[in-house]
C-alpha cells in the first residue's frame, strides 16, 4: 500500500504543479478524492487486504496530505490571479479621497502653465525635453567647447556612461532647432541641475523656461518686447527691469535681465542677496555658430533666446523667501497656491 500511495503522491504533485486554473485543480481533486477517485479505489481494495489496519492508516494519511496539497495549489492560483490583476492596474486604484486629502499643484507648475499660456497666445509652441543629456547637447552644440571656462559655472552630476543631468534648458536648443528649422517660436520648460552649495536663493535642482524665436529680421527689440509683455502679464502690474551685459557663449550680444526684487521692494533682502535686484532672465541674440549647428541659414535668419528662471519667478510671484521650500515636500508650504 505504501508504494501505491507514494506513486499517487508523486502523480498528484506533478498534476498540481502543472495546474493553472481553479477548474483544473477542482478536476484533480475529484479524480483523487472524489467518490470514484483514486483514494476511493484504494479503499475498495482494502476490503480484501490482510493488513487492513495499517493499510487503512496509510490511505488516511495520504488523504489528509492530498487535501493539503490541493488546497495549497488552489491558494497559489488565487494569489497568482490577484497579482496579475494588480499588475494590470485594473483593481489597483486607491481612492485617496478616503483620507480627505485634496491635491494641489506645485507652485512651479502653476507659474509654468501661466507663462506657457502667455507665450502660446503669442504663437510659441511648448516643447518637452530630457533631463539626462549628453555633453554635445548641454555644451558643445551651444558653442561651449570642452575646457571652456564657461563650464565652471555649470558643474553638474555626471553618469558613468558620460551623460549628465542638464544644467540649463538651453540643452534642448539644438534638438528643437533641428526638429523645426526656421522660422521658429518655441518655449521649453524643464528641470535643471547644478552642483551648488544651497542657500535661500540657490538650489541644486531648479526649473527654467527657455524660449527661442528665429526668423528674418529678429533683433534685440523683439526680445525686449516679448520679455516685457510676459513679465507684466505674470505679475499683473508694471515691473521694473534692467538689462546688463552678460556673457554666455551661445548668445551674442548677451544680457542679464534683472527685475526689481518684489519681496523687499528693492531695499535688499536674503532672497536678492541684498542687492534689491533679482537675476531673472539671461538672454541674448542666438550666436550664429549655434544657429549653424542647428542647420539654420545664418545669412537669412537671426534669433533670440532667453533662459527664464522659473523657480525664481515663482519665488517672486508667490513671495516665497527660501528657494529650498520648493523641493521640501512640505505640503503646508506647497499646497497654499491653488488646489487645481
Ligand atoms: N542657459 C543659460 C543659463 O542657464 C541662460 C541663457 C539662456 C542665457 C538663453 C542666454 C540665452 O545660465
Image (cartoon, rainbow, N blue to C red):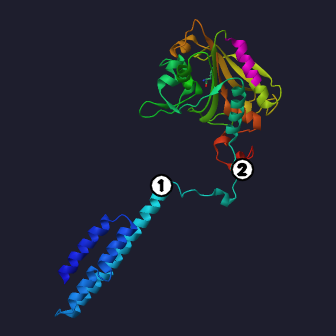
Q: Main secondary structure of the magenta part?
A: helix
* Residue 224 point in image, percent of width and height: 73, 17
Q: Which residue in the protein does label 2 denote?
A: 332
Look at the picture and state if 128 lies above or below 291: below
Look at the picture and state if 6 lies above or below 320: below
Mark nearest the camera among 1 and 2 is 1
* Residue 116 point in image, percent of width and height: 68, 30
> Is residue 73 in the magenta section?
no
Q: Residues within 10 Å of mark 2 (few under 14, many from 20)?
A: few
| Secondary-structure class at tag 1 | helix
Q: Which residue in the protein does label 1 denote?
A: 87
Task: Read off the magenta span.
Answer: 218-229
| Secondary-structure class at tag 2 | helix
Q: Residue at x 49, y 31 (%)?
A: 164
Query: For this view, does 214 lie left or right of residue 272?
Result: left
Q: Residues within 10 Å of mark 1 (few under 14, many from 20)?
A: few
Query: For this view, does 200 lie left or right of residue 52?
Result: right
Q: Residue at x 21, y 90 (%)?
A: 46
**Picture quarter containing residue 64?**
bottom left
**Picture quarter containing residue 305?**
top right
* Residue 159 point in image, percent of width and height: 45, 34
Closer-to-camera residue (222/2): 2
> Is residue 222 in the magenta section?
yes
Amino acid at each position: 500500500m505504501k508504494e501505491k500511495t507514494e506513486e499517487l503522491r508523486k502523480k498528484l504533485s506533478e498534476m498540481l504543479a502543472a495546474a493553472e486554473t481553479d477548474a483544473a485543480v477542482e478536476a484533480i481533486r475529484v479524480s483523487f478524492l472524489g467518490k470514484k477517485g483514486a483514494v476511493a479505489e484504494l479503499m475498495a481494495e482494502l476490503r480484501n487486504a490482510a493488513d487492513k489496519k495499517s493499510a487503512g492508516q496509510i490511505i488516511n494519511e495520504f488523504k489528509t496530505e492530498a487535501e493539503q496539497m490541493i488546497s495549497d495549489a488552489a491558494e497559489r492560483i488565487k494569489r497568482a490571479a490577484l497579482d496579475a490583476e494588480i499588475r494590470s492596474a485594473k483593481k489597483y486604484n486607491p481612492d485617496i479621497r478616503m483620507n480627505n486629502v485634496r491635491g494641489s499643484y506645485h507652485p512651479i507648475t502653476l507659474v509654468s502653465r501661466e507663462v506657457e499660456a502667455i507665450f502660446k497666445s503669442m504663437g510659441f509652441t511648448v516643447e518637452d525635453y530630457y533631463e539626462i543629456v549628453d555633453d554635445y547637447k548641454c555644451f558643445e552644440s551651444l558653442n561651449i567647447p570642452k575646457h571652456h571656462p564657461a563650464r565652471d559655472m555649470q558643474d553638474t552630476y555626471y553618469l558613468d556612461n558620460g551623460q549628465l543631468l542638464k544644467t540649463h534648458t538651453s540643452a534642448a536648443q539644438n534638438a528643437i532647432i533641428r526638429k523645426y528649422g526656421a522660422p521658429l517660436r518655441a518655449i521649453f520648460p524643464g528641470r535643471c541641475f547644478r552642483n551648488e552649495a544651497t542657500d535661500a536663493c540657490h538650489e541644486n535642482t531648479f526649473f527654467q523656461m527657455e524660449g527661442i524665436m528665429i526668423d528674418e529680421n529678429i533683433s534685440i527689440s523683439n526680445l525686449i518686447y516679448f520679455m516685457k509683455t510676459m513679465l507684466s502679464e505674470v505679475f499683473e502690474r508694471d515691473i521694473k527691469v534692467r538689462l546688463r551685459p552678460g556673457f554666455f557663449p551661445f548668445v551674442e550680444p548677451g544680457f542679464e535681465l534683472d527685475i526689481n526684487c518684489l519681496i523687499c521692494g528693492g531695499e535688499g533682502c536674503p532672497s536678492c542677496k541684498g542687492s534689491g535686484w533679482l537675476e531673472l532672465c539671461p538672454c541674448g541674440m542666438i550666436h550664429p555658430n549655434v544657429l549653424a549647428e542647428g542647420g539654420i541659414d545664418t545669412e537669412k535668419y537671426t534669433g533670440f533666446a532667453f533662459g527664464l528662471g522659473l523657480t525664481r519667478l515663482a519665488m517672486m510671484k508667490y513671495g516665497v523667501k527660501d528657494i529650498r521650500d520648493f523641493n521640501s515636500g512640505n505640503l503646508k508650504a506647497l499646497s497654499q497656491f491653488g488646489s487645481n
